[in-house]
Image (cartoon, rainbow, N blue to C red):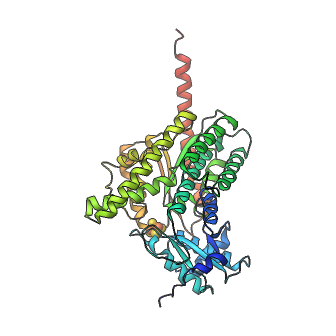
Amino acid sequence: MATKRVLFTKEMKKTHTILLPNMLPMHFKIMQEVFRHYGYRTELLENDGPAVIECGLKYTHNDTCYPALLVIGQFIDALQSGKYDVDRVAVLMTQTGGGCRASNYISLIRKALVKAGFPQVPVISLNVAGLEKNPGFKLSLGLGKRVLLGVYYGDLLMSLVNQCRPYEALLGSTLALADKWVARLTAEMKSRKHANYKTARRNYINILKDFELNLPRTAEKKVRVGIVGEIFVKFSPLGNNHLEDFLVKEGAETVMAGLLDFLMYTVNTAVVDRRLYGMKRTRAAIMRLAYKFLHKKQLDFIKMYKENSSFAPPTDFEKTRNAIKGYISEGVQMGEGWLLTAEMLELIESGARNVVCAQPFGCLPNHIVGKGMMKIIREHHPGVNLVSIDYDAGASPINQENRLKLMLANANRELREQLAAEESTADTTPIT
Ligand code: SF4
């Protein structure tokens, strides 16, 4: 039976708390403040652990995609916690509009809410494809602009944390510095004067310099491990059993592309659809302009990295796009599509020859473009260390960790051999 849709009305904007699922902790903290600035009473969920998974399992069908199960579990666990007035709460979820099942998470959430005894809770769809609309929620241009600033800042902080945390001289100093900036940026988001690209550029440079100059780090050499995968399990600690923390604890440096790449991939999809499948001309033209805009910004970020720090900048997305030539077509767009393959190739070319592909168990599209592409990638890049890890409510964290430890053992051995070879070359180089 179809579940009746409860609208989020204009009145609810004043009375209801909107719960946000937590995919990217730093990005979403900044974005939460953006929504608040526009009058929405948002709250970013922090609940984690087995209780969330149990809730997800209880209120979804057992073949539901793991990211959907977790998001639903996080919402229902929060609603059952007693922390909220359940008659004055709504939940918000992104809706991609793509061909994969992620476009249907909204109806799955609604069904689960009814089953859990919360039929009155409105589910708001956050989408740019003109899918579901609600009278009390509007993704205006100003709101969208600030959300985009949140993506820029979140990506920068995430990249710097990844590059600094394994080498910090004082335990916890990297996350403390990142938290300081998150607090400052969220405060700035409230001001019209500061929520613009000019201020963002200034902040960007100041953040780079702050991490470069004020965060003492050691000069150790560590194994660099790339992370790719389905977007939720790639980024969310809830989805990947705190994969980044685990790898850092085991002595590795993690490397991953930011949310902007995924955004550019999504925008580019409409252009590719037009080129390959003759889809809508107007949509493609608009998306082409949007792509150019985002790409220009990305090139500006790369320039700022190079001019103001010694940190590795993000990769030019055009280079990422071109990396797939000879491997996979841009027409492959289900799940993370060709982007997942491109990110593996790009990581390898940038020197991160150990790559973890994080995938929800049973996620067919990403198994094709992830695990399915590993054989051909290994043929072209002998010696690379590619590991595919499945995440699921039934998957054993011990098994996941053992496979990661095995990968790290090989990677550390190779690093030691490489350092020894470099040392012996240096010893035998004649002094002129
Ligand atoms: S990408 Fe995978 S996990 Fe995500 S909706 Fe599609 S099948 Fe499900």
Q: Residue at x 56, y 39 (%)?
A: 413
The image quadrant that residue 383 belongs to is top left
Extreme residue toward the bottom, this view:
1
> In the image, is 38 to the left or to the right of 263?
right
Do we see residue 383 in this rendering? no
The image quadrant that residue 54 belongs to is bottom right
Task: Please tell me which residue lies in front, 66 or 17.
Answer: 17
Extreme residue toward the front, this view:
193
Do we see residue 348 in this rendering? yes
Q: Residue at x 53, y 26 (%)?
A: 422
> In the image, is 401 to the left or to the right of 260?
right
Task: Please tell me which residue lies in front, 272 or 303.
Answer: 303
Q: Is residue 140 above or below residue 164?
A: below
Extreme residue toward the top, this view:
432
> In the image, is 108 to the left or to the right of 194?
left
> In the image, is 16 to the left or to the right of 62?
right
Q: Position of residue 348 (x, y in %)?
A: 45, 43
Q: Is residue 26 above or below residue 306?
A: below
Q: Position of residue 60 (x, y in %)?
A: 55, 80
Q: Position of residue 8 (x, y in %)?
A: 56, 79
Number of dots carrying numbers: 0
Q: Position of residue 380 (x, y in %)?
A: 36, 44
Q: Residue at x 53, y 78 (%)?
A: 135
